[in-house]
Amino acid sequence: MKYVLMGVLTLGFSASVMAQDGSKADVDAVKKIISSKPADLQKQLKPFYSKNKKNTDNLLAFARAFYEASDTANARAYANYALTASKNKCAPAYVLLGDIAALSDDGGAAAAYYDQAIYADNKYVDAYKRYAMVYSKIDPRGSAQKLDELKQNVPDVSIEAIKAHIFMRASERANDRQQVQENRKLAYEHYMKADISKLDKGELNEFVRASYFTGHPQDAFRVAEAGLKLEPRNRTFNRMAMFASYDMKNYDTAKAYINKYFNESDSVTASEYDHYYAALIYDALNETDNAKKSYHQALDIVNEQSMIKRHAILKALSDSHMKDNDFENGLKYYQQFLDNKPETKVDDYEGLAANYSKWAEGVDEGKKAELTNKAADVYSVIAEKFPVQKAYATYKRAELRNKLDKNMEQRLAKPEYSQVVELLGSKADRSKSENTMLKYSLHYLMFGSYLDKNIPAAKEYAEKILAIDPEYKPALEIQNLK
């Protein structure tokens, strides 16, 4: 009886095991076998496959274990076994096959597998997400539409952060600047619809950059602060908080983040852009010594690939010296700015003239004349480099010469004002500003003739002025002279 009972118990135990068609213990055992990489792998796996060939979940677990061990051939085989066991209704198996294809950089095949997963289970969230991510390389907007389909089938799922991530990745792949900005804008818009409290560090990282680089410093600062609650020493969040504070003109806050970024963040390798922004913040707070130090740190590492260009840093450094009335260095760095800028404009040269004029304000008469003439000479350069601006440059040069001529005693500006009249007098399609320059140039010549007691010539100039401005009082008075 004892042995009979033992036999019955043994039979019952065996029957129970067979009825389960595999067990959780099989998964653990297979994972150990895979990790040990035995030479007779297939031989050791054969009994486990036999026991589990109808157990979809275990077959899928075997496949995932192979995938994680970078054995994609066996991962693919067991994923297909799982599909056979499920009669092709196992969405996670299709997803795994898609992951394997994606690993081989076969985006088309991966998308097809993910689509099959959705067909097998239209509520399987991972399939939609993976489809969207892999298809985003081809069509970011099409990927986003796939997520809208997910939202219809699973209303409770949040898709905005995934959409935002798709567009942020698209911005990083784009070569065209306009496309970069368009995708960043879409990323920003979708992140704004997401629940910020549910975003992880990576999503907040994208959100803060999308906000800042699309011109939303307030949102960038808000997101940076949310990120810093998760990681107080995160360099990206401290950096963006520094930039955003400056753009919002919260300079004291920005200065605090200079310290947090440079001294209290992990793994910081400061760029020329970082030093440049620090300098701008110090300049805004009139801490010009710190500003100049930071500008020079930026100049030490700037190169052709830098986001901020050498000429821009030199211009800011020049402005900082001019603010301190250090005119010699201000002009030195301004000239370096002009020498380094690939394409100079009229405004760039006018800035040089303005710097000479500013220096001329507080010096003795001899030095004033020297500096004012240097400013006037800059307009000679403008006239030569930009022929279309010749009349304007000549007019501005005349104004500067006239400043050195008390009561027009020497008629220093007469050659320039005469040239303006020559350039604009017969021009048929004069602009409003050109009419103004012509009128005041004629006024100078009219008044000079009056001082020389050449009344006929003065009246001739007055007549030309009144043709431009019939109500111009000085010309009317000259016209009425006997």
Image: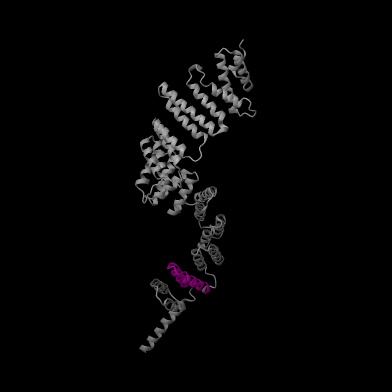
Above/below status of 322 relative to 135: above
Above/below status of 189 relative to 114: above
Above/below status of 90 relative to 232: below
Q: Residue at x 37, y 35 (%)?
A: 288
**Residue 73 colored magenta?**
yes
In the image shown, does 172 or 222 lie closer to the viewer? Answer: 172
Query: Residue 2: which quarter of the image?
Result: bottom left
Relative side of 322 to 106, left or right: left
Q: Main secondary structure of the magenta part?
A: helix
**Residue 362 colored magenta?**
no
Examine the rendering and report whether any part of residue 339 can be seen: yes
Examine the rendering and report whether any part of residue 247 can be seen: no
Relative side of 234 to 129, left or right: left
In the image shown, does 300 or 67 lie closer to the viewer? Answer: 300
Residue 345 spot, x, y in % from top left: 52, 36
The image quadrant where one finds the N terminus is: bottom left
The image quadrant where one finds the C terminus is: top right
Above/below status of 391 relative to 107: above
Residue 399 spot, x, y in % from top left: 51, 24
Query: Range of the magenta residues?
Result: 56-84
- Furthest residue toward right: 428
Q: Residue at x 54, y 24 (%)?
A: 416
- Furthest residue toward left: 263
Residue 454 spot, x, y in % from top left: 58, 13
In the image shown, does 314 or 63 lie closer to the viewer? Answer: 314
Residue 177 spot, x, y in % from top left: 53, 48
